[in-house]
Image (tube, rainbow, N blue to C red):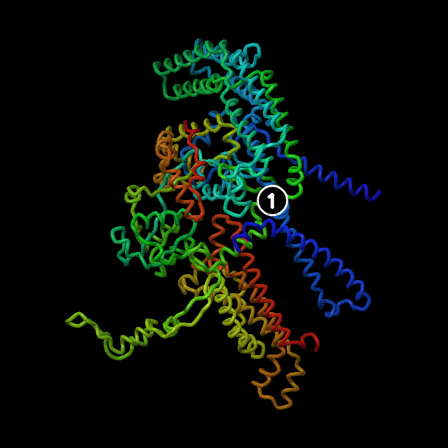
Amino acid sequence: MKLTLKSSVVAAGVAAALSTAPMTYAADQVNAAFFLEWATPNMIAKVDKAYDKAMGVDVNWVDFTTGTAMTEAMLAGDIDISYSQGLAPFVTAIQQGAPLKMVGIAVVYEANDCFVKNGLGIDSSNASELEGKTAAVPLNTMADFAFRKYMAHLNVDISTMQIVDQAPPDGAKSLADGAVDMACVFGGVASKAAREVGTAIMNKQQKVDAGIGSFDVISVTEKFATEEPELLKAFLEATEEANNSFKGTDAEFEKIATASGMDVETTKTQMADFIMPSAKEQMEQYFSEGGIAEAAAASLGLVFSDASDGAAIATTIDGSFLE
Amino acid sequence: MFEWLSDNRALIAAVIIFALVVSFIASIILGRKQNALTENDEVFGDPERTKGGWHWAVCGVSALLLVWFYFSWGVGRAYYPLAANELCQVAKLEEATSPIRAALPIGSRYYKSTLLVSRNADQLEDLRLTLPTDVFSSAEQEELRSLIDQISLLIVNSSNPQNLDPDSIARLAALSADLDALTATLQAGPDGLQPTEEALAQPKWGTTHVEIPVLPMTPKGVLFDKVALEAQEVAGRFNKIRNHLPANDALIADIKSRIEAFKAASEAGTFDESTAEDRDAYVKAVERIFKRLDDGLIFPAASLENVNTAIANLEDAKNDARGGLNIVDALFLPGDGVVKSRTQCTEQGSARWLPKPTDVVATFMKLANPDLENGGGYRGVTLLWWKWLPIADVVGFLVPDWIADIWPGEYASHGPDGTIEPNFKDDLLAFAQGEVSLGYIPMFDGHIWDSMFRVLMALALGILLGVPLGLLMGVSKFFKSFFDPMIELYRPVPPLAWAPLILTIFGIQDDGKIFLLFMVAFAIMVISARTGAVGTQLSKIRAAHSLGSTDAQILRNVILPNALPEILTGIRIAVGVCWGTLVAAEMLAGTTGVGFIENIARTVSDYELIWVTILIMGLLGLILDLIMRWVIDKTIPWRGKG
């Protein structure tokens, strides 16, 4: 008797395990991820429920603190659309085979700066003097990406430099102490500290001329893109409309500031650096064959891993929903 | 050789897993036998009881490895090396049919059309109720109500199967027929299908950065791949079918022109700002719903029944065709199965963050390869190797430059003919800076050595300074009271809190990292030496004293040996804590080291690399601990027997 009981329990367990074929149902709501303290015009559309109206379904906005967390939530099926995911976490996710897609560009902003210690007398005109010097770089981040872009643009051979992996606050401190000659940092506080004792190797205009910039993407799960293409199109349309109707009035800034959890001043400063490319610009410049999105994702992929395949990453970049 | 091992890691794992199961069972049998032999002779609490028992160590290690193999899908890969590739093809089919399933009850409980009808009808009802009476004239209100009625009529027309045009009926019928044909193909089985050469030439599961090869490598996989490809085409057609009825066409044109007329009226009329805004918003809301309904996405439920049945049959056929894969998937691949993305298929569930033991070893071997040109090492530095170290470098490090500065005289300057004649002061400077040739000595090199060097240096300094101080604190009122507050104040502070200070004081070189580790080791050594010294039996000290020992002799010959067990235990603890702090220390300014690799791997969630560093640190800690145990056995064999 004992034996039969045991074997029937095992059988039931096996049957239960076999019947766990995933059954997911299309929900009546779309889950979208966003960042707090990242002031974008579409926060107005979020507050005014313009997305819900345009898509005809409830849009449930969930705030995240990192792009990697957005990836994890999308893999778990909790999030359908990530608005303004960083390029770095997106590329990392793709390299690891996550079924995600880049369908739009959320924000374009200035690349992170590399600060050269004041007193060394090195700027973009004599950058080759950086060879043999020490640089603090937070490896495998967008600052690392920007650092390589700058050095390549200024013809500096980075294999001659001693590169030290330091978090931005530590890098700024080492720059102030003179332990390193250049520090590449990101984040407001670290940048401010580094600016006190150093000068950016390339200024805003030079960066624009050299085409060195960063952007955040709108990413979705493959599942959402194949199953609900109309909803995705409506989402991108609503975003476009929100960007277009943004006039920069005080009332709008206040609304965005409240929605993103910042004060109005900080919101204004942050948004001064943001560019929201229109759907047309995105299609022509970013999502065209060999466009900016493809090129940036491929070269960022190489920063993370020597074995990265840019052509494979390019297959996950799809501007067709912008039409 | 390495290539062959790397390519056949599944096979090797199969042998290892078998051996592990055997040793697990054998060790339990052996252990039980031995227990039965000795059970009655032993006294509980006797330390002798814990001696021996290596078979239980084998049992524990095998159990751990088996759990690791199982949850990393290592067992699945070892015995079903092609299962993941087949599941990848099944995932392709699932992905291909997902647009159709999502529109039907089988995938989403309701027809997508049903959801659209209910959603839009609700929203139209809302509009009807919220029609603002103060901004529209009564004639306009009447017009808007009729507009909303017309839009509702669009839904009614689309939902009636009798309105369906023959073209759509034919297309839907063709679609179900095609799906039925796919079902038949699946049911016919993979007979006669062969994987292509290209597919067979793919790297095996998990041997490259592409986790699971995408092209089908088995006849069954080819079948699924083929069906998936056709299903994709069918799904594409399904997405394009629209329910355009002649009855609606006229209606749509009518509604469109009336909305345009309304907009024009709003623009032409002179309204104050808020009225104009309200008018626009309302008309826009009406137009928005209209636009969702004018593209023929709503089908009569009856018209889709056949497609729903066809796709349900296809699902059944798919589950049948999976056959044995179902069991492999459920029993040996714990987690969410195989997921397909654009670029590759990947493992989901525990296998995503837990790499297989054999993969970790392979990654380790790749890093350990000292041939940097051919992809060995990490970021241009070997893992553990050796190099010729110029003796001059050591001299340059030890001899300070200011010795040359204080030597009388001036440094040489270039003469009128452009030549430089170095004098003794110049030579001295060159010597102090290590710019002379003094020969070479072989020296360790690489990430592991750098980390090991930091830990051992810190430990050595901690022991050299901590033990004497601890002993003195145990015997002297002054030392105890003077140093106690300092050490007790800094000891509980976590090492990371010191990081910014250390960065500023020591800079980015090794000395800062060593100092951070030293602080950890020092506190432990002081406390253990002090505890040991205090614990010395007074009778022993008095006996030595009465036999005429000096203070120094008592300290060296009585107190130190008595404190040794505590000191050696302290070293064992310090070794462990130092390895634990290493990651934090190498985060300060990472250039090399195991902690540096871990910090970089973490930024991109490279789990294989993370596990390699965890294992390296664990194993090095274990080796140092084994050495310490050996030292303890040799130096204080009398411990616990006094």
Nearer to the camera, B381 or A116: B381
Identify the image quadrant of residue B330: top right
Residue plotted at (15% across, 71% down)? B417
Q: Circle 1 is placed at which residue position?
A: B81
Residue B589 position within the rendered picture, expressed as x and y whole percent measured from the top left: 43, 59
Residue A128 vertical placement versus A59 (above, below): below
Q: Is residue A4 left or right of residue A65?
A: right
Nearer to the camera, B285 or B10: B10
Nearer to the camera, A255 or A230: A230
Residue A139 vertical placement versus A309 (above, below): below
Rendered-image quadrant of the C terminus of chain A: top left
Q: Is residue A258 visible?
A: no
Residue plotted at (42% across, 34% down)? A104
Q: Can residue B484 be seen in this view?
A: yes
Residue B287 position within the rendered picture, expressed as x and y whole percent measured from the top left: 44, 18
Which amino acid does the dot numbered 1 rest on? Pro
Q: In this view, does B542 lie to the left or right of B139?
A: right
- The disc numbered 1 marks a residue on which chain? B
